[in-house]
Image: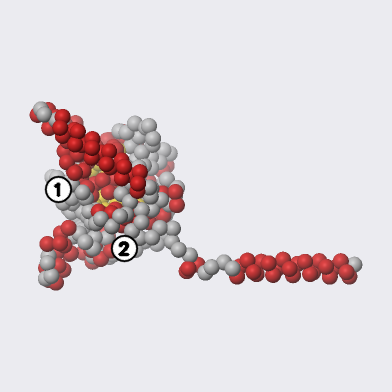
Amino acid sequence: RATANTNLNSTNNDNDNDKASAIASTPPTDTVPPITHEGQMPQKKFYRSRAHCNPLSFNEAFDYPPRPDLFDWTEEHYPNHPQLSDCGTDAGEFSASSAQIHPTVLDVGCGFGGLTLALSALLPEETILGLEIRSKVTEYVRLRILASRKEAMGTGASIAGCDGDGETHDAEKEDGETHDAEKDDTETDATDRDDPNDKRASHRDHRPTHQNASVLRTNAMKYLPNHIPPRSLSKLFFCFPDPHFKKKNHPRRIVSTRLLTEYAHWLKPGEGKLYCITDVRDLHEWHVERCEEHPLFEEVTEEEMEGDECVWAMRTETEEQPAGGSCI
């Protein structure tokens, strides 16, 4: 028995030494390289997250200013905003211009940033901000915007919208340019020239810098008053929000009578627009009903919607829509 116990203790000691050796060979956390370096296009597979969360019980800490005028958007979000390029070297002029820069278009629940980047190209005079509550997804969009800015400067980063496969995307871009050239040769009548698709093609011809786009991790149902000044937004997007099917969860819906009053407070009077899209008919009817009942909103006509390039972008550029699903 003594011999057996001795051998057992010896075996246990050997196992402990193996564990100690394995632990010692693991590199420290601070030396592990990040999944994606800034300037590289992130791969979506490393940033997957749950599709939705309950915004009313989401208790993670968020940084937010006491008042919107105390937040400098040029410090982290828009350091090279197009409006700053006209300031020259005058420090006072630069400070005054940076104080005037704030988001004018919000993509609430921006997901993986497809619409946010598309809007920065379609609306170069606006300042686009994507809002996302999920930390991993927000980091993906942040890296994607940085990579898109780098690519626009000609430093060889992958084009926005791919998952790190720049060569495939470049080939598709070349095919698109060839197609555009052929399209220009064949467009001869006024009907083709007035087609809204031609206007969208003209925006693609203008290579965006994406310096007017950024993303912020926050809870839009709680902290928008801390970031957005009143009567400052021209457009507000809600793309494929969580439908919250159960009646008891309807207060969690991002469009409600109470929240519409807040949205009206931030939208510019007479010109601000609220955009909603979903693949759930019940939620679509909820959106329409709440907006029709609210005294500060009125529905735009079908003709206005067809001529609005942002409606087209909302239907085609967002990555949250289900494959093969119909949108309302």
The percent position of residue 93, horizontal first and vertical second, equals 11, 68
Quarter of the image with the N terminus is bottom right
The percent position of residue 12, horizontal first and vertical second, equals 75, 67
Q: Is residue 2 left or right of residue 77?
A: right
Above/below status of 91 relative to 210 = below
Badge number at residue 64: 2
Q: Secondary structure at mark 1?
A: loop
Q: Are marks 1 and 2 in contact (CB under 8 Å)?
A: no
For disc 1, the marked residue is 269
Residue 251 visible in image = no
Front-lying residue, 235 or 74: 74
Neighbours of disc 2 within 10 Å: few (<14), some (14-19), many (20+): some
- The three-letter code of the residue at mark 1 reads Pro
Front-lying residue, 247 or 174: 174
The percent position of residue 241, horizontal first and vertical second, equals 35, 43
Above/below status of 195 relative to 147 = above
- The three-letter code of the residue at mark 2 reads Tyr
Residue, x 74% and y 70% (percent of image)? 13
Q: Secondary structure at mark 2?
A: loop
Choose top left, top right, bottom left or bottom right for residue 62: bottom left
Residue extending farthest to the bottom is 91
Above/below status of 314 relative to 220 = above
Front-lying residue, 48 or 160: 160
Give the mark toward the camera: 1 or 2: 2
Marks 1/2: CA–CA distance: 26 Å
Residue, x 69% and y 70% (percent of image)? 17
